[in-house]
Image (spheres, rainbow, N blue to C red):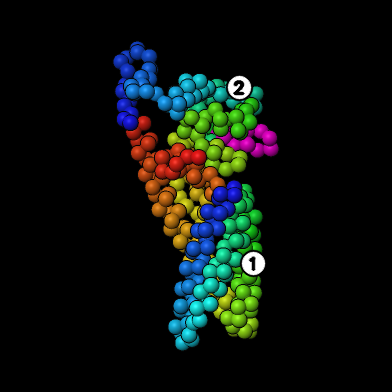
């Protein structure tokens, strides 16, 4: 369980940080702002802080789909509020209805990006496992 | 190491011959578990008592302190704990896929990923079974994709 937690933490830290850098790059390009080097450390810290609840969520294994969906919604909202707190803390922008809306869109993008990356990796692994199953049981049938 | 499976002559008993320079501990324990494993189970269905062959079982599931063996159409209760069945059938093609379930890998038609990180096993009888994230690595290890712990 502990090993699983740290593996998930590392995976999600890398994925979230990559997605935050993409989101920051898009934002800085369109707003034509300059970036200070301290922002890179802030991005790494925000990646780590948001990866923590994600790794914790993955430790739970709910049997029912309903509980699973509730947990994912709570997780999304938690990530969204953590991001808002980090925005305020790092002084990345002022909290206004527009910035809250844009943050929501950014978190949605990061969420979709991270889930898609994990889904694609899982898809690749499953194709490999299906191939192994096929080899194993087609040989046994012969 | 090569694995050769030959069909015996008619009326000849099945035999396992190991040809190696020095059998290591892993090989000996594997052969011993294969030799001693009980491949038949007693299943209870209402008033019926049936002898179940492990090859007919799709999966075992525990529910409210009772354990059931799911075959192609019938569901039998078995008088074992899930961890006992896991120990008993682990040398064969059974693998733990969640806290309450052990699946027969031979009965998996194919696997598909889910967005939640779990896998879905599509069984040969049309049923779908969820494989928890925590147990995906055991399945991979059984399939020879990942190293077992």
Q: Is residue B63 magenta?
A: yes
Residue B54 position, x and y percent, is 50, 27
| Residue at the top extreme, as displayed | B11
| Residue at the bottom extreme, as displayed | A32
Instruction: Say which residue appears at 63% left-offset and 59% top-offset.
Output: A71
Q: Main secondary structure of the magenta part?
A: strand
Badge 2: chain ID: B
Q: Are marks 1 and 2 on the same chain?
A: no
Helix, strand or loop for disc 2: strand
Helix, strand or loop for disc 1: helix
Instruction: Say which residue appears at 60% left-offset and 66% top-offset.
Output: A49
Specify few, some or many for label 1: CA neighbours under 10 Å numbering under 14, 14-19, or 20 or more. Answer: some
Residue B14 position, x and y percent, is 38, 17
Specify few, some or many for label 2: CA neighbours under 10 Å numbering under 14, 14-19, or 20 or more. Answer: few
Query: Where B65 falls versus B134 (above or below)?
Result: above
Name the side, left or right, on which A72 lies relative to A121.
Answer: right
Residue B119 position, x and y percent, is 50, 49
In the rendering, which numbered label is found on residue B49? 2
Query: Where B130 falls versus A108 (above or below)?
Result: above
Compute the Cα span from label 1 to label 2: 52 Å
Query: Where A117 falls versus B23 (above or below)?
Result: below
Instruction: Say which residue appears at 57% left-offset and 39% top-offset.
Output: B101
Q: Which residues are drawn in magenta?
A: B60-70
Residue B85 position, x and y percent, is 57, 30
Specify whether residue A108 is in view.
Answer: no
In the rendering, which numbered label is found on residue A78? 1
Specify whether residue A78 is in view.
Answer: yes
| Residue at the right extreme, as displayed | B64
Q: Is residue A140 magenta?
A: no
């Amino acid at each position: 369980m502990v090993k699983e937690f740290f593996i998930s933490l590392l995976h999600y830290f890398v994925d979230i940080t990559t997605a935050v850098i993409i989101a920051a790059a898009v934002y800085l390009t369109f707003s034509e702002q300059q970036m200070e080097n301290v922002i890179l450390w802030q991005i790494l810290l925000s990646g780590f802080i948001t990866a923590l609840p994600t790794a914790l969520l993955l430790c739970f294994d709910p049997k029912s789909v309903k509980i699973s969906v509730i947990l994912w919604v709570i997780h999304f909202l938690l990530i969204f509020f953590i991001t808002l707190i980090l925005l305020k803390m790092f002084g990345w922008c002022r909290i206004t209805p527009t910035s809250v809306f844009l943050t929501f869109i950014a978190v949605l993008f990061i969420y979709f990006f991270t889930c898609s990356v994990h889904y694609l990796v899982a898809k690749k692994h499953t194709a490999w496992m299906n191939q192994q199953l096929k080899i194993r049981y087609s040989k046994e049938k012969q | 190491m090569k694995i050769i499976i030959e069909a015996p002559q008619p009326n000849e008993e099945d035999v396992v011959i190991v040809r190696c320079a020095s059998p290591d501990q892993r090989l000996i324990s594997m052969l011993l578990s294969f030799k001693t494993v009980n491949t038949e189970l007693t299943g209870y269905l209402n008033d019926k008592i049936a002898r179940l062959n492990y090859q007919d079982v799709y999966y075992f599931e525990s529910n409210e302190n009772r354990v059931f063996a799911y075959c192609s159409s019938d569901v039998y209760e078995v008088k074992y704990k899930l961890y006992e069945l896991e120990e008993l059938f682990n040398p064969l093609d059974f693998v733990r896929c969640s806290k309450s379930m052990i699946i027969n890998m031979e009965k998996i038609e194919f696997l598909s990923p889910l967005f939640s990180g779990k896998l879905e096993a599509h069984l040969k009888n049309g049923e779908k079974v969820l494989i928890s994230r925590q147990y995906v690595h055991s399945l991979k290890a059984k399939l020879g994709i990942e190293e077992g712990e």
